[in-house]
Image (cartoon, rainbow, N blue to C red):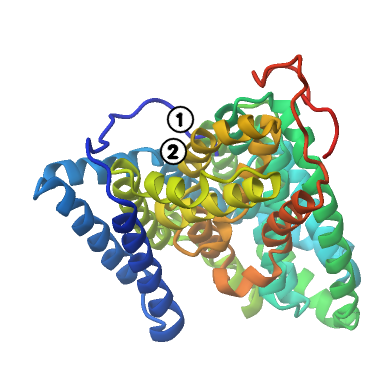
Amino acid sequence: MSPNYGNYPDQSASVKPSFLQALLTFLAIVTVIGIGLFVLETSLHALLLICLLIASGSAWLMTRGDFESIRNAMNSGIARAFNALYIFILIGVLIAAFIQAGTVQTLIYYGLEILEPAWFLPAGLVLCAFMSIATGTSWGTVGTAGLVLIALGSVMNIPLGIVAGVVVSGACFGDKMSPVSDTTNLAAMSSGTGLYAHIRSMSYTTGPTFLLALVIFAFVSMGYSDNAMPSVQLAALKAGLETGYSISLIALLPFLVLIGLSMMRVAPEPTMMASAIAAVLLAVFYQGADFAAVLSALFSGGTGNTGIELLDNLLGRGGISSMMWTLSLAILALAMGGILQSYGFLEVLVSGLFQRARSAFVLVGSTILACLVGNMTMGEAYMSIILGGNLFAPAYDAEGLDRSVLSRSLEEGATLTTPLIPWTTGGAFFAATLGVDVLDYLPWALLNWMNPIVAIVFAAFGIAIFRNRQDVRPDGQGGLHSSGTV
């Protein structure tokens, strides 16, 4: 995604909450979600509605009943993520169009021929990483390659929680390291460092973590080496795909349009629309589908035509309607985040808890934890990155740490943890698209939770902690301003 980082009306309250009020508000929100999810196992939408009421009530005490300003704060929170909401809808359209065009079916067909259970997981991790680096978007990777890997994993009887963890890990690695990614550019900008200095700094912590995840997935994948399907069953699946659809390299055209335009740095919205239009044309003129039925599928999703229940269930996805659960959840979370950000709850909380940090170890850990708290309360990573950069930059300068250490900590705390929280835009989208609950894939999203831990451990031992040169200001220009590790 590439959200618009334009200016929004400042709805900030003139009076900030006390630290105690900010802390109690945050604890109340976490308690409601924690008890609701893990004890009552109830609707996440209902829980977020209660949390929205808690945030509104706390703000109401500050404004003395000025509900209009509270509504404006809610609107500002949603407005900051409008592009993400548009992409929710477009991804649903794209998935449905790809299925109608036979693009997904073709990828599954060739995947059945090439991929073996013994190395399926590490291969999937590398595939998603490369695609996400090329396109700069984890969402597009999850909505295309991720969907295919979920289908293949299901056919191979590999637990879908593991497969989804592979997809999320690979997609987030590429999104984090790609120079065309929105969060990569935003983290560099917010911390005041150069883009490639930021990427180079991330490679010190993210590179080893990716290799560790690759080794773990390779070991786990070997445990499913006996899951290779009998040749008779494999032939039946391929025959079902060939019966229902025209399988050839031509069907991959919409996928190539998506990759090509993304690599040309075309904005995601026109990229996805162009790819979807190509898929619709292919569905009508190559697959022979009815035009009206294809258009209907863009809203409600389609149904598989293979005659094999397993495949037909996997192909009955996509459409605008499939994104409505995710969209409504995101709106509630963003409205709550708008209140907490506009009235300074998170700023007061973070300042009170973390801003007195001075050592490199405490600074890195505090930045990552503060971004995690930001994601949990504001529902998306962008404001966590911006707020974290503004709050912690002076402390990094006072400690003599290079701003690239700050920028990578922002990504490790914000970008990587978003998919691990069910009510964030990322967590809700990944779960809805892959058909796997966040809590099911969370243990297997190895890169997402191991990378922050690796970063904190490295900081504790002074590894890859870059310090400013005496003759260079941390102005964000050029390469890594460092004199080596501590």
Res. 449 in view: yes
| Left or right, 484 with reference to 128 | right
Q: Nearer the viewer, residue 466 or 214?
A: 466
Compared to residue 248, the image places residue 395 above or below, namely: above
Q: Amino acid at mark 1?
A: Asn
Please name the residue shown 90% across and 83% down the image: 226
Mark 2 or mark 1: which is in front?
1
Q: Nearer the viewer, residue 351 or 254?
A: 351
The quadrant holding residue 106 is: bottom right
Q: Residue 309, how many percent across, how many down?
A: 62, 79
Q: Residue 211, how many percent across, how many down?
A: 86, 55
| Left or right, 195 with reference to 377 | right
Q: Secondary structure at mark 2?
A: helix
The residue that mark 1 highlights is 4
The residue that mark 2 highlights is 83
Q: Residue 164, how many percent across, how many down?
A: 67, 66
Mark 2–mark 1 distance (CA, rounded to whole Å): 7 Å
Extreme top residue here? 471
Q: Are marks 2 and 1 in contact (CB under 8 Å)?
A: yes
Q: Secondary structure at mark 1?
A: loop
Residue 157 is tagged as none
Q: Residue 183, how many percent across, how many down?
A: 59, 38
Please name the residue shown 87% across and 64% down the image: 113
Please name the residue shown 76% across and 14% down the image: 471
Compared to residue 57, the image places residue 33 above or below, namely: below
